[in-house]
Amino acid sequence: PLDAIYDTLYLNTDYSLDEAGNEIFTIGTRTVPLHRSIDVSIEPGQRYSKPEKGVAVYRAVGNQYTYLGGDWSNGRVHFSTRELGEFIFLKDSIPPTITPLSVASQGARFRIKDSLSGVATYEASINGEWVMMFYDNKSNTIWSKLLDPAIPLKGNFELTVTDNAGNQTKYSKKIL
């Protein structure tokens, strides 16, 4: 897009495979800043079975991956990025984890994590009614907030956590 770069940009691209056979697409260098997001369209050299199911683009820095997603159409993936560097296709088939810290009538507290694509949504209910939850991404902790402190959490509590790849984990408990 217009004004996405600060000045003239000499852009280099490269294609390689890592030791696991994953495709790595290099676009520029990660030290070159962008003013706005750019749109990227890549046609992978490898064929992915049902690419829309869990296969996404990640920005790679060493062994760390940042989920970018991407929309697949006609064998190509389209995504936006605010940073240049190395991009890799990875499949996330592992659902997020839910670790209960405390589940009682006074409130519920959990640690939620996802190993690759990151947590996209979380939703809690008690007896089918929505429960307000707060999230601290530094500690990966969510906790309930009672709308009326005089009414405790009692009944069938359910928590559903979904990652960016669409994998889900559900937690259920009857609170007495």
Image (cartoon, helix red, strand yellow):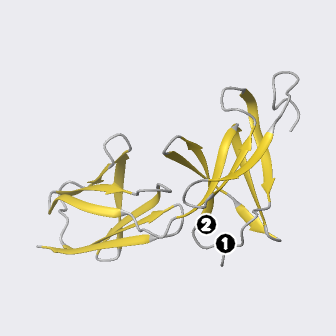
Q: Secondary structure beneath disc 2?
A: strand
Residue 100, picture quadrant: bottom left
Q: Residue 74: give its label.
A: none
Q: Residue at x 81, y 28 (%)?
A: 5
Q: Residue 134 at what x, y percent from top left?
A: 35, 49
Amino acid on which the number 2 mark rests in the picture: Val
In the rendered view, would you say 130 is above or below 174?
above
Marks 2 & 1, CB-CB < 8 Å contact: yes
Q: Residue 12 at what x, y percent from top left?
A: 81, 36
In the rendered view, would you say 55 is above or below 18?
below
Q: Residue 174 at what x, y percent from top left?
A: 17, 76
Residue sitting nearer the eye, 38 or 143: 38
Q: Residue furthest top?
A: 7
Q: Residue at x 57, y 69 (%)?
A: 54
Q: Residues within 10 Å of mark 2 (few under 14, many from 20)?
A: many
Callout count: 2
Residue sitting nearer the eye, 8 or 138: 8
Residue 61, picture quadrant: top right
Q: Secondary structure beneath disc 1?
A: loop
Q: Is residue 44 visible?
A: yes
Residue sitting nearer the eye, 49 or 5: 49
Q: Residue at x 20, y 74 (%)?
A: 173
121 left or right, relative to 88: left
Q: Is residue 156 visible?
A: no
Residue highlighted by disc 2: 55
Q: Residue furthest left?
A: 176
Residue highlighted by disc 1: 51
